[in-house]
Structure formats: structure tokens, C-alpha cells
Image (cartoon, rainbow, N blue to C red):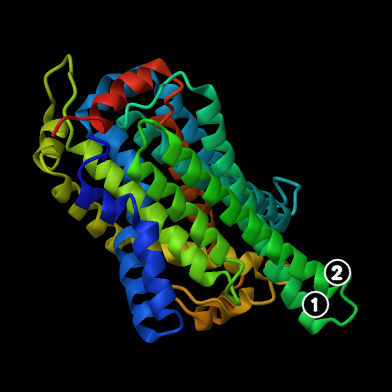
Amino acid sequence: MVWMRSRSYDAVFMMGGLWTMGLVVALNGTGLLKSIQFGLAVLFWVGHRLTTTYIAYCQEAYREHLTKQRVRFLYVPGAVLALVFIMVMVPESVLPVPVLHRLLALAALDFAWEFYHFTMQHYGVVSIYRMRAGQDPGAVADKRWEKIFCYAVFGGGIPLATLYHAFKGMAASNPDFFMPGWGIQGMRMLGIAVALGFTARAVVVEARNPKMSLPKLLYMVSVGLPVSLAFVYDSMAPALLILAVQHWMVSVGLTSHMAAGRAPVKTEPNVWYRFWNVFNRSPWAVMVIMCIGSAALAPVMEFSDVERRYVMRAVRAAFDPASAERHYVYWGAQYLDLLAFMGRNTVVSLFIATGFAFGYIHYLMDRAVYRFSDPDTRRQSAPLIFQKL
């Protein structure tokens, strides 16, 4: 079977970029699209950040792996959590580094890590479909090309689009801006050419493969076309919506599929695993848990996210003139104004630290669960990913 679970399941969850792109193209700028965006964010945004933690701690197949690799699954996340709270909470009288500088360092790390996180998810999905199709596992050149595709299209295209929109906005408000109009438009054309060119090559390369994988081809298209839209629309919001929903749906869909899988275990389940095994009998039950957790935590986590962005707003506005006008799922611009009256107090710092830590833990757990370069990780994950239905 070339699909991960089934044609319909993969179409909804693994190919989310395609149907989200159709919605954006058809409904961009309408209230209906905003309502759909709200619903998807509530159900999947925070839930996708819980996915790999759920696999690691609630799927019995990872029990032995968790014990063997406590450093990666427990000690490193704990150390990162402690470090983030120290960076944000410790006063300058104790740690003689301005708090704003610490937040800038955390934000820069978050920005770079998030791009790597997205890029490697794309490569991971492409690899799953490569293996599902039975393509030559020794074809190093093919794997290298797939990784180049992910790095060039997403890892290069989105930062270039960010610069393009930032420069376009600054040039519109400053006649003496250092880059002329033709240079800014050149960035736009370069971005479109990179996204569409690499995507076209991906289609041709896959079509020529004797064991061509349709889902692999469709997934690469679902990455390349939205990136090109980042240069087509007047803002990056439509493209980022597509890519974000795609990312969420893949995380939740893959986790629900793996949680419902069965793998050999050497020990009898304890009370903890017996409880979660009730839900792990069905991917849909796991998905309901993810959606409920997302809906419950979304207001709290967005509260943290807005506070992080409030601290960063003055810095980000220098590069993105529209940053101050962005709205969020629950909290709008009026909340940003409210924070100005709250000042920097312990409550604000706690939320900022929580926002950063939650993202970092998510990146770490994704890497730990899907680290296929490690033989132990492959042994635990492969039966769950490539399960026979």
C-alpha cells in the first residue's frame, strides 16, 4: 500500500496543504475563511504540539525506549524548561543581562528552530511515502534531492518571502529605502521561480521513478505551491495559513495513526498504559483527545503567545510594518494595549516563559520520537508507522 493509512485518511490529514490551498484561493478575504481558520486553530493548533509527547508517554510501544533514552525524553526537556524560565524570570540584579536581550535570544532561537522543525517534518513525510512505495532504500541521490527540495522550497522560500514583504512595506513608506523597486520585484520573481521550479522538478523526478508514489508526489506539490503563493498575495497570511494547517494536520494525523498501532512489548501494561490503551484502539479516539486538549489549552497558550509577541512587537515592527496589526484567535489588538497597563510583572513573565518553553519542548519531542537515524527509535516507530491495517 502506497498510502500511509488509506487514500481518504491521507487526503484529509497528510495532504492538508492541498485542500487548505483550495479554500484559501476560493475564499481569501471573506468572513467564511476567517471562521474556518478559527475552527481549525482551536481544534488543531495546540493539539499538534501535544502529539509527540502523547506518543512518547501514552503509546506503550515507546515504554522501553523511554526508559533507555531518559536523557533525550526527560532530562534534556527538563533542562530546557528550567533554562527558559531562568532566562525570563530571573531579575537583572541576579543575572546581569537585560531581560529584553534574553528575550531576543530566545525569539531568534525559536524562529530558526521552527523553520528547521517544519522543514524536517516535510522531509519525514516524503521519506514515509518513499518507503511505503518500496522505492530503492539505497538511492542516496534520491534522498539527497528530496532533502534539498525541502530545504530550498520551505527553508529558503519562506524567509525570502518574509524579506520581500518587509522590504516592500518599508519601501512604500520610505522613498529613500536602500533597495529599488526593481530589486524588490526581483526577490518576488526569484521566490516564485524557486518554489515552482523545484516543485516541477519534483513532479518530473517522481513520475520517472519505476515505483512512482502518487501520495509522495502530491505531498511535495502541497509544499511547493503554497510557498509560491507567499509571493503572489499582498501579504504572507494566506500562504502561512495553508502551511500552518498542513503542519497541524500532519502532526495530528500521523500521531493518531501511530497511537492506534501495535508493536511487540516485553512487559505487562501498568495502570497508566491500560488507561491510554482504551483510547489507542482507534485513531479517531486519539484525535478526539488531541482536539479536546487543543480547544481547552488554546486560550491559555495564545495568551502566552500574544505576550511574547507584545515584548517583540517594537523589534518586529522594524522588519514587518504590519506586525502591530495582526490579530489572533482569541485575543485581538485590544489585549496588546491592555498589556501596556499591566507592565512587566511576574504574571506576564510566567506567560512569556510558558510560551517559549511549550514551543521548545514540542521541537525536542518531535526530534526524539522521529529520530530515524537512531536504530532504537526506528525499531519502536517503524511498526507503528508501517502497520498493516
Of 328 and 182, the residue lying toward us: 182
The x and y percentages for residue 208 are 44, 37
State the residue position of label 2.
Answer: 179
The total of numbered circles placed on residues is 2
Q: Is residue 57 left or right of residue 354?
A: left
* Residue type at tag 1: Ala
Graded by Cα atoms within 10 Å as few (under 14), some (14 to 19) or many (20 or more), the crowding at tag 1 reads: some
Q: Secondary structure at mark 1?
A: helix
Q: Is residue 109 left or right of residue 387?
A: right
Left or right position of 182 against 57: right
Question: Residue 326 location, x and y as percent?
Answer: 55, 76
Q: Is residue 166 above or below residue 368?
A: below
What SS does tag 2 mark? Answer: loop
Query: Label 2 near label 1: C-beta < 8 Å?
Result: yes
* Marker disc for residue 171: 1
Q: Quadrant of the N terminus?
A: top left
First in residue order: circle 1 vs circle 2: 1
Q: Position of residue 305 (x, y in %)?
A: 50, 63
Residue 54 point in image, percent of width and height: 28, 40
Residue located at (31% from left, 19% from top): 379
Mark seen at residue 67: none
Quadrant, the C terminus: top left
